[in-house]
Amino acid sequence: MKKKRIIIITIIIAIAMAAGVSAAFLALKRSRGKDPGYTVKENSDVIVVDGEDEEDAVLPEDEITGTEAVENFISVSVNEEERKSISESLEAVEGLCPGPDTGYIFVGDSRFVNMNTVCEISKKDNLFMVAKVGEGYSWFNATALGQIKRIVSSGLFNKWKLIICLGINDLGNLDKYLNKYGEIKEDYDITLVSVNPVGNYGNLSNAQIEQFNAALKDLSLPYIDTYNVLMSTGYSTTDGLHYNGDTTRKIYNGILAGLEDLNPGTLTSDQGDILDSASQGKKKSIQNDILAQNKYVKPVKEPETVMPEVTLPGTIENTGTENGENVNLEQEYENPGSEQDSEQGAENGDNNDITETEEQNNGEEGGEEEKKEEENGEEENSEEDKKEEENKEEVNEEEQREKERREEEERREEEERREEEEREEEEREEEERKRKEEEERREEEERKERERREEEEKREEE
């Protein structure tokens, strides 16, 4: 009996070891096909992000942030079963796209701008992009909703769905987002996407993001949790805030998988053109106009001053009569020989002067052409700088207006708070006054009652 137990235990151990080896082989096999952007440490459930592939490094991060991209390495603790399940879901939607009967409007900030560059979302007939770098609630309320209304009123599709991912730039505006989503959900079919995690980026923390997402999830609107996708499978950023190509595609596929999960049958294989040529032209015109309106304006740099090359008179390169005479005079002083040698030298000097003058004239003509080209280039740069300066001024004016509006709101709120406190103080004083009057009235009645009883007692005694 004891021998049988030992045999059974030995078999179980062997099966477990074989399963472990198979799992390791499968993981290795998957990793050989394509670098997933992270590695798994031995005997650990921690995914370490290895950064971006070179081909994925060419992202619009310079356009977005104005700084060089710096890799961030993110370690994420995960549940292996959950990671495997999510990875399979992402693989299942690869190459699929939302069905042709609905128009989808992606609304977001720089992360969606980056996603549109990597995944070319707005090039598909039924997908639109409304996104702007560095923006949040104020832009969404003042600008994006108008752009969304323009797209919906185009009549290109009968059904529309908004896919909104905002908040990373203004987590403190949570209540405003919740109230606005509650207002517009009667007019639009809204699906919210979680704000996704960060690396090492300023004062932002994933704990803050998780609180924000928890409030979104409780809003009773369709919700896609791509935050958990990244935390379960690993992610890589280029500057702590924006993602590399692989992670960006992972988020996009996570959104597609979420749409399919919320409404099975949403995704189909890519069927090519959905709209006719006229409708495609209309769609392209609207989309390009909105992309131009939301284009990121780089900070204006002072143009470098390029000084044109100037040949000063009297230099060796400008060998004229004056220099020629000086040279000949020196030669004559050093070699007071025959006049014939001197004349011969003068003739050669004249010939050399003519040749050098011709070369100088040719050089000056070339220099004038180069100068004209430089002037034309400077004029073009000046025009571009002028446009960039105008765009910057518009952005600054808009930011100033927004700042003034916020200050005005804060001032009104402060005044309302003070007025409310004053009203409450007046009410308390009024209540206190009435209470005192009531006490005085009761004391007066008691005094009169005592006097009355004393009078009665006195009469009875008499």
Image (tube, helix red, strand yellow):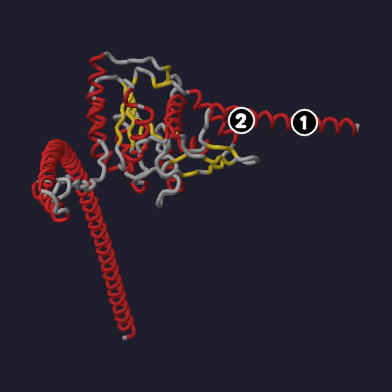
In the displayed structure image, the side of residue 238 where residue 14 appears, left or right: right
* 53 shown above or below 65: above
Residue at mark 2: 28
The residue drawn where x is 34% and y is 38% is 110
Q: Residue 371's spot in the image, x, y percent?
A: 15, 39
Q: Examine the image and state in which quarter residue 369 appears.
A: top left
Q: Amino acid at mark 1?
A: Ala
Q: Residue 53's spot in the image, x, y percent?
A: 47, 34
Q: Give the mark, 2 or 1, whose residue is nearer the N terminus.
A: 1
Q: Residue 449's spot in the image, x, y percent?
A: 30, 75
Front in this rendered view, residue 45 or 35 = 35
* 276 shown above or below 337: above
Q: Amino acid at mark 2?
A: Leu
In the displayed structure image, the side of residue 424 where residue 80 appears, left or right: right
* 304 shown above or below 229: below
Residue at mark 1: 14
The residue drawn where x is 43% and y is 23% is 263
